[in-house]
Image (cartoon, rainbow, N blue to C red):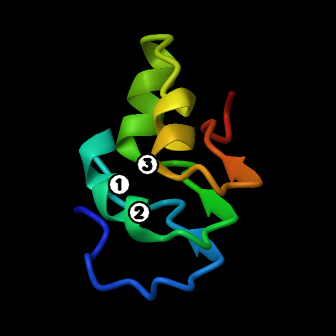
Amino acid sequence: AALPHHLPAALHTLDVANNDLGNLSDLRYASSLMELRRLDLRANPFTSMAHMQRIDYRPFVVCLCPALCTYTLVPPDA
């Protein structure tokens, strides 16, 4: 399940923890959120899989959403 493409451009906080984001491409619409400061991605299938495979996806997320100040990316059991 990808993020909807109609999210408000002025959105500051996005909590998609415990959703069904299966891969990083599900976040593609977040790049249009120029005001996004906080992003929570915990407990999504792609975060758990990346953690198990020791893949650091944080640079991709930061590149996608450069205005982020706070982001929670690791699964809760890390």
Q: Which residue is mark 1?
A: 27
Q: Residue furthest right?
A: 69
User: Mark 2 vs mark 3: which is more N-terminal?
Assistant: 2
Residue 76 location, x and y as percent? 67, 41
- Which one is nearer the viewer's eye here, 16 or 30? 30
SS class, disc 3: loop
- Under mark 3, the amino acid is Asn
CB under 8 Å between discs 1 and 2: yes
Q: Which residue is mark 2?
A: 30
User: Mark 1 vs mark 3: which is more N-terminal?
Assistant: 1
Residue 27 location, x and y as percent? 35, 54
Q: CA distance from mark 1 to mark 2?
A: 5 Å
Q: Residue furthest top?
A: 54
- Under mark 1, the amino acid is Leu
CB under 8 Å between discs 1 and 3: no
| For discs 2 and 3, the disc positioned in front in the rendered view | 2
> Left or right: 20 with respect to 17?
left
Q: CA distance from mark 1 to mark 3?
A: 12 Å
